[in-house]
Amino acid sequence: MKAKIKDIAKHAGVSTGTVDRVIHNRGRVSSHTYNKVKQAMRELRYKPDIVARTLAKKEKSLLKILIPYPYQDFYWKMIRNGIEQGLTEFAPYRIKGQTVFYDMNDPGHFESIAQQILQEKPHAILIGSEFYRQTIDLVRQCSEQDIQCIVMNAEIQSIPVLTYIGINSYVVGELVGRIIRSTRGCSSVMVVHTTENIDNTIHLKNKELGLFDALDQSSLSFQKESVIFSNKKNSEMDSSSLAAIIKEKEIDTVYVTTSKAYMFANALKNQFPDLYIIGHDLIDQNISLLKQEQIDLLIDQSGYRMGFLSVKSWVDHHILEKEISEKQYLPLDIIYKENLPFYI
Amino acid sequence: MKAKIKDIAKHAGVSTGTVDRVIHNRGRVSSHTYNKVKQAMRELRYKPDIVARTLAKKEKSLLKILIPYPYQDFYWKMIRNGIEQGLTEFAPYRIKGQTVFYDMNDPGHFESIAQQILQEKPHAILIGSEFYRQTIDLVRQCSEQDIQCIVMNAEIQSIPVLTYIGINSYVVGELVGRIIRSTRGCSSVMVVHTTENIDNTIHLKNKELGLFDALDQSSLSFQKESVIFSNKKNSEMDSSSLAAIIKEKEIDTVYVTTSKAYMFANALKNQFPDLYIIGHDLIDQNISLLKQEQIDLLIDQSGYRMGFLSVKSWVDHHILEKEISEKQYLPLDIIYKENLPFYI
DNA sequence: TAACTTTGCGTGTGCGCACACACTATATTT
DNA sequence: AAATATAGTGTGTGCGCACACGCAAAGTTA
């Protein structure tokens, strides 16, 4: 039989109210009784009944969620879906989650929205970070105001957060490199970055680094190329200049470091039908191209799981009082046409 | 504000007791009031509060779990771990899970244990199946006694179960085939089955089928070989006769269809260091060989997730009243040395 | 010393629900 | 017609906990 608060109270020779004050550190308990109660809790191995606690609780905990507009980026859209799933799944625990979006191309917007959120004094903020410096600022303010932080995507050093959830970009690159290394007919590799956001470049460059390092470890030798591709009209690297490079360098393998492999494939696959194309993330456009064998391979960065896990981490910590680890790296799922159905 | 039982009662002009009888189909309600209450529930969009329900419930639901001894097979050991994880995670919902093991080489043992379990009149049985016919028998008996069944591993046709959870063996083979097809230096493939259990052969043969079909779709042509390997002294196919075949047929690629790739690798990798070895499942022995590059690739059949999901499915259905799908195929994770850390 | 504040405790209520029980009106048996 | 069963309904209690409140004793201020 599990010990209840009543049992603790009887065992310690106090009332349930006192036990309650000890459990929740509400004060107004002499250090002597405090110790007696603590001792009783230890002896009877008291574990709170989460279900009863949830039912009795008056104050609902507020979780603010700060992520980029889902329409700006499909990866964030998936993360958002995961977050929503988490909120639904843990709804019985009375988590009140409120999502606020920011413009992922405007650090200032992030800052101002962050300030608004702080006004509301939430119990925790789930930060989907695109801006390194601004995120550090926000985390610091949270820490001053005793608001817990869960950070996704951008790894923050030196400032304590409840947990960081994300991927290890360098390892992503390594993994892609290992696959290219062992794949038939891959010898001349082009890395394609599709971004205008400078903050994001670190991740992308890390992938490139990991990839090239992995290739260098092979006994075979590889041609390596790296470009920044934009579909915009007036950009310096449009699809025609890309085509020129592919022709000139005899590129046979392309790795798009972002979610936008579909952009590349749509623009160039008909000119170069034999290109081996590797991209990221199970977004609709990529999925359909993978099915049509226009894209050969996707490494999923588990956006959905990232969102879900971030909510789950908060619940684990705050409701279920579980220990959660400081950093949580998500798996990198390797997805071909054949195992795609299991992931969607 | 969510509608509560009291609200329904007031709205229907009856007492909460009557509403309770309607909700739980306890009878003793005239059809007229029954309809009134049902109507009120619909109008107020009544959803039971799972937390309050769990707290108030007297009768705890009993879930019997029937799986092979974990020490007989590492895959089942992982499944078991997943089940235990599930039971822990959903413990707040007062699920009482009791695991009973059977000898995976003895159908009779399965049968007798199954009878014992039925004596206890559980609410549901989670069947980790190794024997096709015996499982069908058990499922039928459960169906007669209004006991829900969740079946893992062996896909039962024509008899209704709450849900089936497993993998699609043919697709597993296809996936392996697709990878071999595109991997450098693979041309002569040997499929290795390591089993004495006849029932299991169907799965293994399906994998082989999927693999060979995938290879046949390639423009390249592949040598195909298939053997049943046993490490036992007096078996017809021991490691030396296997070595002879590898030499004779110039095998360069080996696919072990079970969890026992480590057995093969340990027996033959030093004689044939360049063999490309593909196996299944993240069991300790395989993991360490993958790290040492003695095994090149593992397809994880998600034993852990299978166990977890089976418990979760029961909770979703029985506690949370969610719709759950009839068949749930688990993802096939492709695991190289590089992405291994994320999966363990 | 009287009027306060603070400290340190105990008591009581209700969260939303399941379930046991009590009660009446009608139907069935003897 | 009386005794008994049964259909149909309402009431009350408690699951384990959080939290508001009450109340005495000790400390503080004027």
Image (cartoon, coloured by chain):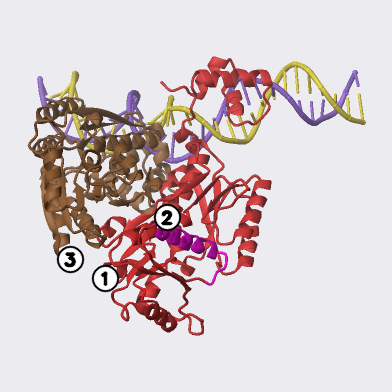
Chain colours: A red, B brown, C purple, D yellow
Q: Secondary structure at mark 3?
A: loop
Q: Going from the N terminus, do you reach mark 2 or mark 1 first?
A: 2
Give how far across and how far down residue A279 sits, in percent.
38, 65
Q: On the rendered structure, is B9 left or right of B221?
A: right
Give how far across and how far down residue B13 sits, in percent.
37, 45
Give how far across and how far down residue B157 sits, in percent.
11, 47
Q: Of the numbered discs in the image, which one, if any, rests on residue A292?
A: 1
For badge 3, the amino acid type reads Ser
Number of residues whose C-alpha sits closer than 10 Å to that of mark 2, classed few (under 14), some (14–19) or many (20 or more): many
**Is-magenta flag for residue A205?**
yes
For badge 2, the amino acid type reads Gly
For badge 1, the amino acid type reads Gln
Q: Secondary structure at mark 2?
A: helix
Quarter that holds the C terminus of chain A? bottom left
Query: Toward which corner of the image does residue A239 lie, by quadrant?
Result: bottom left
Q: What is the C-alpha distance between the residues marked 2 and 3? A: 37 Å
Q: Which residues are magenta?
A: A196-217
Q: On the rendered structure, is A13 left or right of A1?
A: right
Q: What is the C-alpha distance between the residues marked 3 and 1? A: 16 Å
Q: Of the numbered discs in the image, which one, if any, rests on residue A82?
A: 2
Q: What is the C-alpha distance between the residues marked 2 and 1? A: 26 Å
**Is-magenta flag for residue B131?**
no
**In this picture, is B176 found above or below A17?**
below
Closer to viewer: mark 3 or mark 1: 3
Q: Secondary structure at mark 1?
A: loop
Q: Chain of mark 2?
A: A
Q: Which residue is mark 3?
A: B218
**In this picture, is A278 found above or below B324?**
below
Closer to viewer: mark 2 or mark 1: 1
Query: Toward which corner of the image does residue B233 lie, by quadrant?
Result: top left
Q: On the rendered structure, is B341 left or right of B303?
A: right
Q: Nearer the viewer, residue B293 or A320?
A: B293
